[in-house]
């Protein structure tokens, strides 16, 4: 799949290093069922 967007849900203070890429979630699809993510692989309904 080709990524549509990536999300990094970690909080990072101004004096801290930027979190690594392993904590990102990739959005690779959207349908009537919800939004498809990787890391972990799941489909979540829209809020």
Image (tube, rainbow, N blue to C red):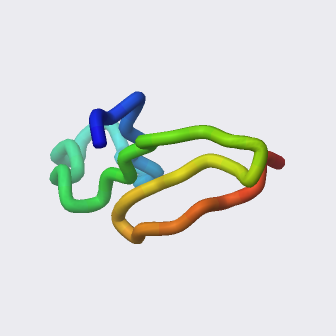
- Residue 24, given in percent of the width and then of the height, sits at 32, 52
Q: In which quarter of the image is the N terminus?
A: top left
Please provide percent x and percent y for residue 17.
Answer: 16, 46
> At 40% from the left edge and 31% from the top edge, which residue is drawn?
5
Q: Residue at x 70, y 50 (%)?
A: 34
User: Where 12 falls versus 41 (above or below)?
Assistant: above
Give the residue at the far top of this rendering: 4
Q: Is residue 42 left or right of residue 31?
A: left
- Along the line of sight, the residue nearer the viewer: 14 or 2: 2
- Seen from the viewer's position, the closer of residues 12 and 28 is 28
Q: Which residue occupies 32% across, 35% down? A: 3
The residue at the far right in this view is: 47
- Answer left or right for 7 relative to 43: left
Q: In which quarter of the image is residue 32?
A: top right
Front residue of this view, candidates 16 and 41: 41
Q: Is residue 3 left or right of residue 20?
A: right
Report the residue at 16% width, 53% height from top: 20
Give the tally of numbered discs. 0
- In this rendering, the answer to whether 2 lies above or below 16 is above
- Residue 15 location (% of width, % of height): 24, 41
Reply above or below: 9 against 39: above
């Amino acid at each position: 799949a080709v990524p549509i967007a990536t999300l990094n849900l970690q909080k990072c203070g101004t004096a801290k290093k930027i979190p690594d890429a392993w904590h990102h979630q990739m959005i690779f699809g959207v349908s009537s069922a919800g939004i498809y993510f990787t890391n972990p692989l799941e489909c979540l309904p829209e809020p």
